[in-house]
Image (cartoon, rainbow, N blue to C red):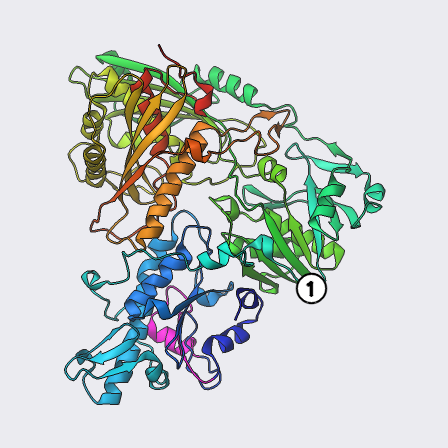
């Protein structure tokens, strides 16, 4: 059965195909909170005489195993790693396992992918799924032989009676196993991790062959009979609407079927779900793109039409001079006596750090295929959050969510951008008006200028060290734009005298989560300023940072969640990365090493960058060493390494080259020639990764390795040149030296 076929079927057809003609065992669950008894009673559905509690695992009479992957595959490898967890506990032969993407269905529980949450929220659940199926197969074999079940083991796709050596393949046990009750998922016996044979090994992505042969896995590949192609022109200034356009002329252009204005707004929380614009419907994407070049729209520009980055920077500088308690200055947190600590300090350092708005720059541009029929709609979308897509589609269509069917496609890069579904809203609105299936595709300009950007920000910092060289006071005034405001209180865990001030600037810029939200910028600012303080104290940066982390295992949490911070885990990765990188070795002028570390998305990661800067200021990143603690189990070693490498390269690209300039209420950059991404010649010459296994639940790896790399590189540049980088991107700073 092709991937495309599986994207278009109702639930009963899905279950029927999943069960296979001739019989099979399918094990699954309906809700995360349901126990085994609830699943067995609520989830039973008979199809062709096959017992089906639901559908996560399919075992056919020929012994083949199919595992359904319910989470969106964004490139983070979850479509491979979570089925590996199931197969490990099941005792399946991985070479006999087929992984299939599941449609959006409550039967699979939560189906979003973001915040590096897929592994921590699904790891134990998938283990229990595999273990429950294994329990049933073992019991079926034991009944067949008339022996106790505890004398049998499952491995390599078969059950073996240890005493007699008799063996039955999984396929031979399907009929009997299908008659057995589903065991309670929370009481099934799980494998001892020391007995794992699949987890921790290197497994290639299950879609690799399809990707390299160009098979239609991604949203942009999807097609439906009778569909047309569309583009949607939005106002360059956020918050504006179209007044009129040369629609009659556009309709005369080759391949154009229709053109019309959509003048309504559907808000989606704090972000934009559907904004007014002009739709062009055509026979091909190229015809639609070509026609848009001749589109002439008169826009009613909103109140942000004169806003600019330069103006934001000016406002931030003025506000930074205001005293706490001033109208625009919010005192978010105060610990100890900051003023007294500064007055008695041996050294005081002041600095301002800033970073721009940047785009997600997904390789696959935003797209959606929608087919509206009356009050129902079916969509095919590369979405990280299919429930959100369904909700927005229902809002746009004015129907109930149950009238929206979402088919989850593979995603060509998300990084948080595809947690929001504005292209879905646009495609549904256009299909509703056109009355046919519509495939909407954005171009690079759309992606750059109508992203939900990583927020820019300004940090005005003051820090102190005492006569013993210890960090004694920290003052931060954060001026930003709302969506990431007030979360940079990490130092409050470690410094007795701390003051955090916040100011929110009024703006109309759409913002949203960008890979390692908050952490991706705070780590750079905090670790860079800690490096400044270490040098002010005359101390080695590694030794200084270890002293800041203290000697306690757990440190009180901060912020809304207040979860304890495991300082011991962080000290361990800092020590490990210092050892593995050869920290402290003599280096010639123009060469340097820098440290960055951070706790992000439940992962504790430290990185050291080794750089060379020529006298003319040409930067080369020679080596990056990472020490990574994401818990007790690396699921797929190949995938884990890829995620750390990708995070490091992405983080370098963002810190070194990427920025969006805002002028007259709009993004200036129009394509990648004005928004350069990291190229192969500028990538690190070597990336070394060292995983630390610790006694904590496994977590995800899509984000935690990104935050430490920007400060590691910037601190290495300082070590090489004496030049401090306090403004991103790094290209803003002249790195030449003599």
User: Looking at the image, which residue is at 41% across and 15% down?
Assistant: 616
How crowded pointer 1 is (Cα within 10 Å; few <14, some 14-19, many 20+) is rated as few
Magenta region includes residue 43: yes
Q: Secondary structure at mark 1?
A: loop
| Residue found at x 59% / y 58% | 380
Which residue is tagged 1? Answer: 225
Q: Is residue 337 visible?
A: no
In this rendering, the answer to whether 638 lies above or below 709 is below
Q: Nearer the viewer, residue 320 or 119?
A: 119
Numbered range of the magenta stretch: 22-44
Q: Looking at the image, is 302 positioned above or below residue 33?
A: above
Residue extending furthest top?
Answer: 738
Q: Which quadrant of the rendered structure holds the C terminus?
A: top left
Q: Residue 55's spot in the image, x, y percent? A: 43, 72
Where 735 sits versus 51, above or below?
above
Indicate the position of residue 207 as horizontal and vertical percent values.
45, 58
Name the quadrant containing residue 241. top right
In this rendered view, identify the residue nearer to me: 417 or 550: 417
Q: Position of residue 731 (x, y in %)?
A: 46, 22
Task: Give whichever of 10, 300 is nearer the camera.
Answer: 10
Residue at x-position 25% and y-position 70%: 187
Q: Locate residue 298 relative to residue 377 in the image: left or right.
A: right
The picture places residue 557, in percent across and down from the top left corner, at 28, 39
């Amino acid at each position: 059965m092709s991937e495309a076929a599986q994207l278009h079927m109702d639930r009963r057809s899905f279950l029927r195909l999943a069960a296979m003609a001739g019989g099979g065992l399918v094990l699954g669950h309906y809700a995360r909170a349901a126990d085994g008894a609830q699943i067995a009673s609520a989830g039973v559905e008979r199809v062709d005489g096959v017992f089906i509690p639901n559908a996560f695992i399919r075992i056919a009479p020929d012994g083949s195993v199919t595992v359904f992957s319910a989470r969106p595959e964004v490139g983070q490898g979850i479509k491979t790693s979570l089925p590996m967890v199931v197969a490990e506990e099941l005792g399946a032969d991985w070479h006999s396992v087929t992984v299939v993407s599941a449609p959006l269905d409550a039967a699979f529980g939560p189906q979003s992918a973001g915040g590096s949450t897929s592994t921590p929220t699904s790891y134990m659940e998938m283990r229990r799924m595999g273990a429950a199926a294994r329990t049933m197969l073992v019991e079926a074999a034991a009944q067949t032989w008339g022996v106790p079940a505890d004398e049998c083991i499952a491995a390599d796709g078969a059950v073996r009676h240890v005493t007699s050596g008799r063996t039955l393949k999984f396929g031979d046990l399907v009929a009997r196993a299908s008659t057995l009750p589903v065991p309670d998922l929370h009481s099934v016996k799980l494998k001892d991790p020391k007995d794992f044979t699949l987890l921790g090994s290197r497994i290639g992505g299950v879609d690799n062959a399809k990707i390299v042969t160009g098979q239609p896995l991604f949203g942009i590949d999807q097609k439906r009979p009778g569909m047309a192609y569309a583009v949607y022109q939005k106002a360059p200034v956020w918050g504006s609407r179209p007044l009129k356009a040369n629609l009659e002329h556009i309709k005369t252009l080759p391949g154009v079927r229709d053109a019309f204005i959509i003048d309504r707004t559907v808000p989606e929380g704090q972000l934009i779900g559907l904004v007014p614009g002009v739709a062009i419907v055509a026979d091909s994407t190229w015809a639609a793109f070509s026609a848009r070049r001749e589109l002439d729209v008169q826009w009613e520009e909103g109140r942000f039409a004169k806003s600019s980055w330069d103006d934001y920077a000016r406002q931030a500088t003025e506000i930074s001079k205001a005293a706490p308690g001033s109208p625009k200055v919010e005192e978010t947190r105060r610990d100890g006596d900051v003023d007294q600590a500064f007055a008695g300090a041996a050294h005081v350092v002041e600095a301002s750090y800033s970073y721009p708005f940047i785009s997600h720059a997904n390789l696959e541009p935003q797209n959606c295929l929608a087919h509206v029929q009356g009050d129902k709609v079916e969509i095919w979308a590369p979405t990280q959050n299919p429930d959100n897509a369904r909700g927005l589609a229902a809002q746009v269509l004015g129907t109930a969510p149950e009238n929206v069917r979402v088919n989850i496609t593979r995603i060509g890069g998300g990084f948080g951008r595809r947690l929001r579904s504005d292209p879905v809203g646009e495609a549904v609105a256009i299909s509703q008006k056109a009355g046919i299936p519509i495939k909407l595709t954005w171009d690079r300009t759309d992606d750059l200028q109508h992203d939900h950007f990583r927020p820019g920000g300004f940090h005005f910092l003051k820090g102190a060290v005492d006569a013993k060289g210890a960090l004694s006071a920290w003052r931060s005034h954060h001026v930003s734009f709302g969506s990431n405001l007030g979360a940079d209180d990490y130092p409050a865990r470690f410094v007795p005298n701390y003051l955090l001030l916040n100011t929110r600037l009024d703006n109309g810029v759409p913002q949203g989560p960008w890979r390692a939200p908050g952490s991706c910028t705070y780590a750079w600012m905090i670790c860079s300023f800690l490096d400044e303080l270490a040098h002010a104290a005359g101390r080695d940066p590694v030794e200084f940072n270890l002293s800041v982390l203290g000697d306690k295992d757990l440190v009180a949490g901060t912020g809304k969640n207040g979860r304890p911070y495991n300082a011991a885990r962080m000290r361990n990765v800092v020590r490990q990365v210092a050892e593995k990188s050869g920290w402290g070795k003599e280096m010639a002028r123009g060469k340097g090493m820098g440290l960055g570390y951070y706790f992000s998305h439940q992962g504790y990661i430290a990185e050291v960058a080794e750089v060379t800067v020529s006298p003319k200021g040409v930067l080369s990143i020679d080596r990056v060493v990472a020490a990574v603690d994401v818990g007790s189990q690396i699921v797929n070693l190949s995938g884990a390494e890829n995620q750390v490498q990708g995070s490091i390269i992405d983080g370098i690209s963002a810190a070194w080259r990427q920025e969006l300039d805002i002028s007259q209420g709009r993004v200036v950059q129009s394509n990648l020639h004005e928004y350069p991404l990291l190229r192969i010649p500028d990538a690190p010459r070597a990336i070394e990764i060292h995983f630390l296994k610790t006694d904590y639940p496994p977590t995800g790896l899509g984000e935690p390795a990104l935050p430490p790399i920007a400060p590691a590189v910037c601190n290495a540049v300082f070590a090489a040149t004496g030049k401090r980088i306090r403004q991103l991107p790094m290209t803003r700073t002249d790195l030449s030296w003599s």
